[in-house]
Amino acid sequence: MSKDYDPPMHSAEHILNQTMVRMFHCGRSINAHIEKKKSRIDYRFGRDITKEEVAEIERRVNEVIRAHLGVTEEFMARVEAEKQFNLSKLPDDAGERLRIIRIGDYDVCPCSGTHVTSTREIGTFRILTITYADGILRIRFKLTRASGIGS
């Protein structure tokens, strides 16, 4: 694996992605920069979002985190994965057998990153800022982690 992933932050990215899909039907992110202290994620989007929508995103993401969902991996042949998932963001060397990450019954997608084993390891999700320009909605977020978990 070429990237140095932070498992709690990377798992939170998956939950945020699925929350955006469910709330806005916008599709998963088009770009992300995930780091331990703070991260950002971009979506193709037709407008800015309201303060109420920001609060609802935070509420929903934290509700999923507090559900203590298991995070599991399974493997699938690329030909089968292509029928279920958009594979365009996978690295070129992903191969013919793909790793699929499942967060409870909330999210499932191909991924080469490292993850927590339970959402209880993530901490509290907080949106720092949201900007909108040229059809791109950028969300910057961080996690507040419980003592001894994900540190």
Image (cartoon, rainbow, N blue to C red):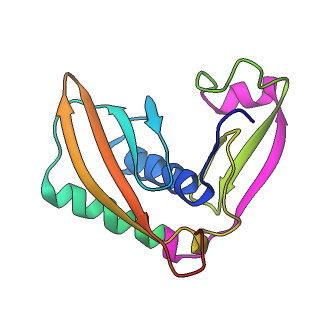
Residue 83: percent from the left, percent from the top? 70, 27
* Position of residue 115 in the picture relative to residue 30 (left or right): right
* Position of residue 33 in the picture relative to residue 134 (left or right): right
User: In what quadrant of the picture does the C terminus appear?
Assistant: bottom right
Residue 115: percent from the left, percent from the top? 67, 55
Q: Which residues are magenta?
A: 65-86
Front one among 83 and 129? 129
Residue drawn at the location 70% of the way across and 25% of the way down: 82
User: In what quadrant of the picture does the N terminus appear?
Assistant: top right
Residue drawn at the location 44% of the way across and 28% of the way down: 30
Front one among 131 and 75? 131
Residue drawn at the location 44% of the way across and 56% of the way down: 37
Above or below 83: residue 115: below
* Position of residue 145 in the picture relative to residue 23 (left or right): right
Please identify the residue farthest to the bottom as the structure is shown: 147
Q: Quadrant of residue 62?
A: bottom left
Residue 10: percent from the left, percent from the top? 56, 51
**What is the number of callouts on the image?**
0
Front one among 140 and 2? 2
Can residue 49 be seen here? The reply is yes
Above or below 114: residue 94: above
Above or below 67: residue 135: above
Can residue 28 be seen here? The reply is no
Would residue 109 be counted in the magenta stretch?
A: no
Residue drawn at the location 20% of the way across and 39% of the way down: 131
